[in-house]
Amino acid sequence: MLEISSLFLFFPLAITLHNLEEALWLPQWSKYAQKFHAPVNKDKFHFAVIVITLLAYLATCTFMFLPQILVCKYFYFGFLGAMIINAIFPHLVSTIILKKYSPGLITGVFLVIPSNVLIITYSIYNKVISFYKIVLSTIVVGTVLLIMIPILFKLGKKFISYE
């Protein structure tokens, strides 16, 4: 039988596979989506994806080992919620609007959303966290991640160069 703590490990697995899908195909795809945002350079994007994936692992580890520390719990569940939103906006919406597959859609819709919803549902049912606190955490963590992305792109341009 699956240990309950193992359930929380589905998040880093799902985000790793999701970010791998994005890393492989999103930089090239972003040239097609120029009417919505500037194309994403592979170097910058890979750096940002690595950092965000590592943050997901950090959020999971700190919550699993220090669940009594509220900031760890809110960071983890906020990240779960932010990734659910990420699967919808931009992946699902851009696929519909552009009529072209957005890298990250399959893993987002069929892996990230179901696993994160399962974790959240289990956690609300077992009073690990309330729905209200998940919504609030999602807004805070999602906003922080959105602010971090352009910063990570600048750092990626500075630290990574494939050419």
Image: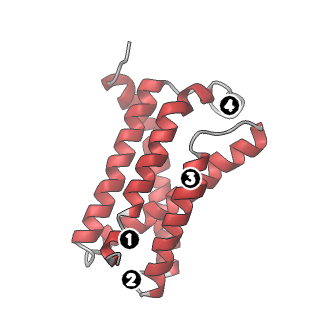
- Secondary structure under the numbered disc 1 in the rendered image: helix
4 vs 3, front mark: 3
Q: Which residue is mark 4?
A: 33
Marks 2 and 4, how far apart at CA: 40 Å
Along the line of sight, which residue is nearer the eye, 73 or 87?
Answer: 87
Amino acid at dot 1: Leu
Classify 47 as above or below 160: below
* Relative side of 153 to 70, left or right: right
Q: Does label 3 or label 2 sit earlier along the sequence?
A: 3
Q: Which residue is mark 3?
A: 108
Q: Which residue is mark 1?
A: 7
Identify the image quadrant of residue 4.
Answer: bottom left
1 vs 2, front mark: 1
- Secondary structure under the numbered disc 2 in the rendered image: loop
Q: Is residue 38 visible?
A: no
Q: Does label 1 or label 2 sit earlier along the sequence?
A: 1
Q: Does label 2 or label 4 sit earlier along the sequence?
A: 4
Instruction: Check the picture and name the quadrant holding the N terminus.
Output: bottom left
* Residue sitting at the far front: 1
Q: Which residue is mark 2?
A: 128
Instruction: Check the picture and name the quadrant holding the C terminus.
Output: top left
- Secondary structure under the numbered disc 4 in the rendered image: loop
Marks 3 and 2, how far apart at CA: 24 Å
- Secondary structure under the numbered disc 3 in the rendered image: helix
